[in-house]
Amino acid sequence: MKLAFLQRDTGIINRMMPLLATLLAVLASIIPLQLPGFAVVTPAFALMAVYHWSIYRPDLLPYAAIFAAGLLLDLLNGAPLGISSLTLLLVRAAVLSQRRLFAGRSFGVVWAGFVVATALATALEWLVVSVLYRLVLDLRPFLFQGVLTISTYPVASYLFVRLQRNLMRA
């Protein structure tokens, strides 16, 4: 009897893993990296999480959870409310529309898709923030964050895959 109860609880935790990993990625996205000579930037870990789970387990990361994660990210970053939600939801929709292209392919194909998604997300955020503030913002911090995000994705992807293999048996 106890064993069945523990197995049921483990199943719930496993099904929540993409959401929990995404929330952890949101928290990691607000930890500033102090690099000499550069503005304080961090990789977009939340974007990495949404991209990964949208390819491999979209059923376990609903749109509402992505919207909430984006709002939390904006609140923690002090960004205009809704920008991260908009970006993450658009990336999710784009990835889902092309999911067949990525699922079951080599990491190079998945990473190439992430490069495109990051470039579009970075451009969208820069454009929306520039319009909201009614001035053309310096593009360099956005570009640096995009490059940092792209170069960090292999490590994050490896961690997400390990998490998926070890904890997700649903």
Image: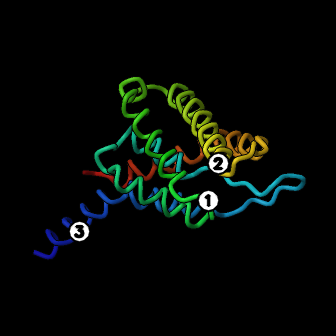
Residue 136 coordinates in the image, percent (x, y): 75, 42
Q: Is 82 situated left or right of 143 in this image?
A: left
Categorize mark 3 by other alpha carbons within 10 Å: few (<14), some (14-19), many (20+).
few
Residue identifier under label 3: 9
Marks 1 and 2, the one that precedes in the sequence: 1
| Residue 116 position in % (x across, y down) | 57, 29
Choose between 112 and 127: the one closer to the eye.
127
The disc placed on residue 129 is 2
SS for tag 2?
A: helix
Kind of residue sitting beneath label 1: Ala
- Residue visible at 59% across and 37% down? 118
Q: Tell me the SS state at disc 1.
A: loop
> Marks 1 and 2, Cα distance to the nearest angstrom?
9 Å
Give the SS element for disc 3: helix
Check disc 1 and report the residue beneath it. 79
Q: Which residue occupies 52% across, 44% down?
A: 157
